[in-house]
Image (cartoon, coloured by chain):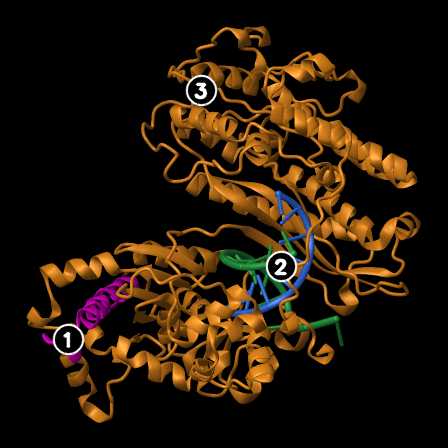
Chain colours: A orange, B green, C blue
Amino acid sequence: MPVSRPELSDSRVIAHVDMDCFYVQVEQRKQQSLRGQPTAVVQYNSWQGGGLIAVSYEARKFGVKRSMRGDEAKKVCPEIHLVQVPVARGKADLNSYRNAGSEVVTILSRRGRCERASIDEVYLDLTIAAEAMLVDNPPECLETISEEVVKSHVLGLEEDGSNAREKVGHWLTRSDASRRDKLLACGAFIVAELRLQVLEETEFTCSAGIAHNKMLAKLASGMNKPAQQTVVPFSSICKLLGMLPIKKMKQLGGKLGTSLQIDLGVKTVGDLLQFSEEKLQEYYGVNTGSWLWNTARGISGEEVKERLLPNSHGSGKTFPGPRALKTVPSVEKWLSELCEELSERLQFDLEQNKRIAHTLTLHAHAYKSNDIDSFKKFPSKSCPLRYGTSKIKEDALILFQAGLREYLGLYNFKISGNQNSGWGITGLSVSASKIIAIPSGTRSIMNYFHNQQETCPQVKLSSEKLIQDAPLLSPSENCIENGGHMTLQSIEPWISCSEEDEETKHSLPLDRQLDKEMCKEKLPDKETSICSSPDAEVYRGWEKDQTESNGDYLTEKIRDSLESEEGKRKLNKEKGMSTISRYFQSQNSGDLLKVEHASTSKLSESPSLSDHQSEPPQENSPARGESSVDARLCSHIKLKRPAWSYDIDEIDQDVLNELPKQIQEEVQAWLRPQKRPHTVKRDSGIARYFLPAKNK
DNA sequence: ACGGCTCTTACG
DNA sequence: TCGTAAGAG
């Protein structure tokens, strides 16, 4: 749902740049003979010639549309060239487009804050650059203006006939213009340059909108395509929105827009002006109501975020109708393909961008026949993400099984969980999210762990969560290995190592526990992470040697848990506790819990655990005031292997009492599961538009 | 029982 | 927090 943001400045210079039929351009660059030809990119789908996902402007003239099938397109445009999307592992492979998108983003980010909005779109905040230009090199002083910028469209200028360029040129260089208009004019110059650079360096054309906010820039970029740009002066806003069909506004293309039409009789954005903010809030809630009110006036304070890379990676496939997957093994097979692609992209992201994803999520669409609640949705499930293709596969399958069990219900799962009776999977996807840049430098790594400990010493686990998520925790938990060195050289090997290597030797070298359970607030962001010295540091692969059994162990447990509710509860407790135990271990409460120590591996040969009391200064040791905690944490991070299971009765109350209060509370809460906090249903509001139309 | 396949954001 | 839903392209 859209949310209103206060407008911080009304003279920002914001651009939206949109690649023209991007996939087609990528294919045309690859195969130059397609240039200028009516062309479309089709997605592999033998049914009716595949679905079009991008259509060249030449083909559009013939009436070819996206969301036509290949066969239809041929009918209206027999000359059309249909190019197939690359296929890998039995599914569409969009990597070439992603990479091309990155090329463009790199160029477009040169002049100001840049937000990658999708594979082929970015927002730019050019305020600073435009202000600077206005000071140093104002358009009114320019002697010549480039072809590209004089081709701009300026809303509100009547561009009738041949003198359009003259008028635009005049508007751009007017010395008596308002400051806002001058800033936009500067923006137009900058964007024209950027677009030219994109063309020269990538061969791609794009269109752009230049305005005072994202909403208007986006609107404008679509007004003159392809390969053109459009400016929205302040004075043109009213007219622009007054005419605009409500559905054309971003965020109003779906149910909300429909609801506005039906419930309020609104046809254009301008029609919204009649309604008071309160009225709109009454209908659509405070946030959306305010957003609508502001939107009608062309007000949008949404900022351009600095983001050049995606926040998540996903890989999915649909299995429509008769192709639905009906057995667990077939699901496993496809899951495996999807996980391979995902893993590959994660490795790539790691190498290229030094980022690590922390959460793995599985989504599925399913149907089941002959059941009361056959409309139930397949629940999505997530767990900590462990690097390594086969680990991802393993975990994804576990997530799937957990989801399936929940979807089918205990009874049906037991009866038919494994055979094809009554259920089918029509869509599967795995995705990786919570992608965080690896802080570089020993100090920042130390800081990283330290901060996490400082800011969130409490293990954030509610009993509710435990029960819910228990079976979903990672079967094998990694421990943290921080050798104190991190260099490119040291990171490369395990990045590029082979599958076997990866599986036997390298797990993800990051603290999933620490960041996930101890301290989400203080994850290193641009401010806190120190990008200082490229000095020697290592993220060693966290060894693993307790893995093999764990996957099976978990599977067993799930199976066991099916036998009785009691079994289920027990399992949950164990899983939750193992999570807590990991924390305790890193807190150096070795005797608190009885753990099954796995054999040591070569990585843990260094200083022994007992050193932890004394300062174990490592090379490049933190050696700052707070080093004691750091060092201790690190030594544990380095040496301790979290237990997979332990005996709950072994918890020593005395030791427990020594723990920080918050931890104690968490443990107590776990020992005596508390009732859920009663969540109050939000004041009814009128959530009408969320309901299917017929229910209204 | 779908156009496929991604991706982001907001909410409870 | 996780899981869901809407929305965009």
Number of the front mark, 1 or 3: 1
Q: Quadrant of the C terminus of chain A?
A: bottom right
What's the residue type where badge 3 is placed? Answer: Gly
Does A634 sit left or right of A242 as displayed? Answer: right
Q: Assess whether mark 2 and mark 3 are in contact (beta carbons under 8 angstroms).
A: no
What's the residue type where badge 2 is placed? Answer: Lys
**Residue at (41%, 69%) from the top-left corner?**
A25
- On the same chain, marks 1 and 2? The answer is yes
Distance between mark 3 and mark 2 Cα atoms = 41 Å
Find residue A292 and report its horizontal and vertical position in percent.
47, 72
User: Which numbered dot is residue A484?
Assistant: 3
Residue A197, magenta (yes or no): yes
Q: Kindly identify which residue carries mark 2.
A: A91
- Dot 1 or dot 2, earlier in sequence: 2
User: Which numbered dot is residue A491?
Assistant: none
Number of the front mark, 1 or 2: 1
Distance between mark 1 and mark 2 Cα atoms = 54 Å
Q: In which quarter of the view is residue A258 placed?
A: bottom right
Q: Is residue A41 visible?
A: no
Find residue A145 and report its horizontal and vertical position in percent.
13, 73
Along the line of sight, the residue nearer the viewer: A538 or A462: A462
- Give the prevailing secondary structure in the magenta stretch: helix
Find residue A544 and report its horizontal and vertical position in percent.
64, 24
What SS does tag 3 mark? loop
What's the residue type where badge 1 is placed? Answer: Ala
* Label 1 chain ID: A
- Dot 3 or dot 2, earlier in sequence: 2
Q: Residues within 10 Å of mark 3 (few under 14, many from 20)?
A: many
Along the line of sight, the residue nearer the viewer: A246 or A58: A246
Q: Residues within 10 Å of mark 2 (few under 14, many from 20)?
A: many
Q: Which residues are magenta?
A: A171-200
